[in-house]
Amino acid sequence: MLPNGEDIVDVEAGKPGKKSEINFFRETQQKFSPKQKFTGDKAYVGESAIKKPKKKSQNKELSSQEKSENKELAAEIIFVEYIIRLLKIFRVAQARFRLNPDKYVQIIMTICGLVRLRIGTFIL
């Protein structure tokens, strides 16, 4: 995503089935430049290439500076979450894929095109 949810830049459709976000990222990371910056949510804990929010430890609260940094990061991430919600409206990305598995990537890309059309970045 571009900042502020302006456009979908790249889509990795993956395959039908369950897979954690961190494992999917690790599998596809070599396709990007080592200088590429990534921002993610708490699902990416343990990955050094991704800027993510701080988590509090069991016995210690976050400092006010860490909390404000988390809020700034959440303000960046919210636009991505909004676009993901628009993709999930079509239920292909959240429900069991019941069509021919060979058509999965084509359908995901079509849905991304429809979402880009909806947010006004795809011009016919």
Image: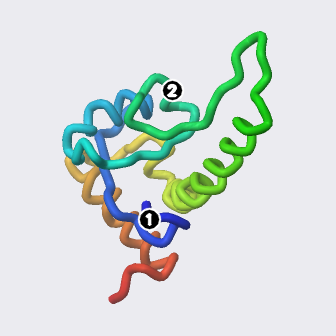
The residue pinned by badge 1 equals 2
Q: Amino acid at mark 1?
A: Leu
**Residue drawn 43% across and 60% down?**
1
Q: Is residue 77 left or right of residue 115?
A: right
**Residue drawn 50% across and 42% down?**
40
The residue pinned by badge 2 equals 45
Q: Position of residue 66 (x, y in %)?
A: 70, 36
Residue 96 or 8: which is nearer the viewer?
8
**Residue drawn 20% across and 38% down?**
30
Q: Residues within 10 Å of mark 2 (few under 14, many from 20)?
A: some
Q: Is residue 98 left or right of residue 100?
A: right
Q: Amino acid at mark 2?
A: Val
* Tag of residue 64: none
Disc nearer the start of the sequence (1/2): 1
Residue 47 or 13: which is nearer the viewer?
47
Quarter of the image with the C terminus is bottom left
Q: Position of residue 113 (x, y in %)?
A: 37, 71
For the residue labelled by badge 2, is the local secondary structure a helix, a strand or a loop?
A: loop
